[in-house]
Image (tube, helix red, strand yellow):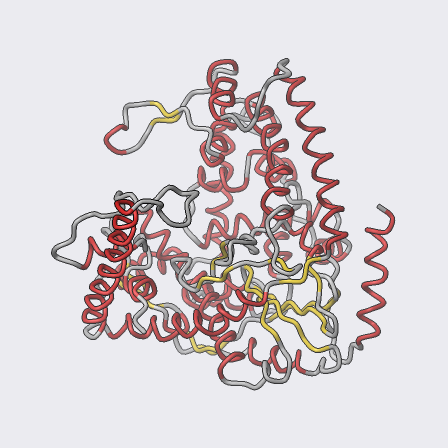
Amino acid sequence: FVDTYHLFHCIYPEAPKTLNFIASMVLDYVQYWKDENKAKKEERLPNTQEKLERYWRYNALDCYYTLLSGLAILQAMTKIGWARENYNVEFRSQVGPALAMSMRGFKWDQSRKLYYESVLTEEHFRHLHELKTMVDDEEFNPNSPPQVASLIYDVLGARPLKKRGKNANKLKRSTDEKVLRIIATQHPLIGLFIQKIWDTKKPANNISKYIRCNDLNGRFMYQMNAAGTKFGRYASTNHQFWCGTNIQNIPKKMRDMLVADDGYVLVEMDYSQSDAKFVAYECEDAKYIATMESGKDTHAIHGEFFFGFKYEEIVEGHKVGADWVDHPVLGVRQNTKRIVHGSNFQMAGFTLYITMGHEAVVAAATTMKKVNAAGQPPHLWTIEELVAFCDEQLERFHELYMGLRPWFKSSAQECARNGNRSTCAFGRHHLFFGNVLEDNQIQRELSSFFGQGGTAGNINRSLNHIYYRTDLEQRGLLLLTQSHDSIVFLNPKDKLEMIDEVLTIMQESVTIKGRSMFVPVDVAVGLTWGKGMMPYKKGVSYEDIVEHEREYAKKFQLN
């Protein structure tokens, strides 16, 4: 009845949640026990008396420290009202909708799974052949960190990054993707090799993670965790029944492997431009609020501001999926979203450059017809010039909405006055570590808390309302997953009117600093998750959905 994991997360959401860390934080007397030998990993139970007693002792210590830690945190919780408020929402979410989603899983279309395995296998070996040709070595293994490090740092001459902390003067020959994103900016040729390594590895990784993971009775399984993120969004991991994996990271192009159960349709309800709307109302910038309440595509509004294309042109291009609008690297709408996100969350120019990626920044500057002091086009610019371009775009957005920067400052001051604690929409509280008035990283975390925490609070409110306060599940609705800003569920095919009931719940209004607002929801329905779904309109029939699926399924029949 006392959940140590969730109790601790509701007080210290940024701290590790392993049992040994929790025990070391809340107990006066604790001896580290996690290095004691339980048994060999491959053994179910030890096979000698000595090992068995050690195994029993290890498990007894786990129980002992869980009990003591739980009681200690519970005692502290009686004095921390705001943490109890967090716990009331989080624990109800975990034992209600999160558990229900975790135990249902998603129906897996086996023929589509085989289709993607074939496509990704071909893609992997094609890139692997090209990579081996580039390095002129048939034995090169992109999955070997030593070989990749030798190629990047020894052959191509990349400069290693300095380590942080006590080893700050040492160089780090890391092959981690986040580090290589920075290394790739040192020279176009280095970036070309790094990109080819990723192009080779990712198809194979997708096969391993999302195709060959164990299923359960033909279902793709996953675990939903209400304490898996700092600001309240659900996280996803592999299932506790030794199968499945994280459903939230499935590439969008592969989601159509997952389909509706017989007698149901799939429904996805996605909060539209949610984080930005919460930021607009929190910072109380009248112009920003007016933009978000205009009823228009705000990404197209901001795209017109940054790139000079007419609003109508961007909207029309988005409807037909034109590359100049929606391409993940070159599209003006996609790059607009990245700039706005960076501005809302106080990114510096270099961080935005890394987040967008070199090619996207060059594409954005090229589309804006920028040249440097020497009259050169963006693809010839130095990294410093591209970072300066990113700084310029962030500054332009802050000049458009003058209320953002004063709000960044005032929210940090208020957080400091409140003992480093802030509260976002729907009453989620967050305790920040460090000097919130001086530390820029903490201030960026704080500004993102209001956008991401507001969205997470809205999603959790909706899920708990559906699960606990309505009879929708008793009438056949089945919650499946929460992914990013959306909720996915199964709806009985003969009760499509229930979709409108869920929409009403999700679009319930909230009051922020005296202003009432709601976040609009985009609704899609279909028999296949992802691109196989069609926009939902009131009055749509099951026959309409079946016909749409029939047309979409031709993609797989042709292949």
Q: In the displayed structure, does residue 334 sit left or right of residue 545?
A: left
Q: Nearer the viewer, residue 256 or 443?
A: 256
Percent x, y of residue 186: 49, 24
Is 391 left, or right, of 101 in this rendering?
left
Q: Does residue 302 appear anywhere in the picture?
A: yes
Q: Residue furthest left?
A: 28
Which residue is at the front of the view, 224 or 36?
36
For the point 31% across and 57% down, the residue is 409
Q: Position of residue 68 (x, y in %)?
A: 20, 64
Quarter holding residue 109: bottom right
Q: Position of residue 264 (x, y in %)?
A: 72, 73
Q: Is residue 6 above or below residue 332?
A: below
Residue 482 sits in quarter: bottom right
Which residue sits at x=61%, y=70%?
A: 521
Q: Residue at position x 50%, y 72% from top?
A: 97
Along the viewing direction, whichever of 172 and 474 lies nearer the viewer:
474
Left or right: where 492 falls relative to 281:
right
State how many labels appear: 0
Residue 306 appears in view:
no
> What residue is at 49 percent from the left and 54 percent from the top?
237
Q: Taking 120 as reference, is 468 above or below it?
A: below
Q: With 69 as the anchor, is 360 left or right in this view?
A: right
x then y, percent, for residue 217: 64, 61
Question: In what quadrant of the picture does the C terminus appear?
Answer: top right
Quarter occupied by the N terminus:
bottom left
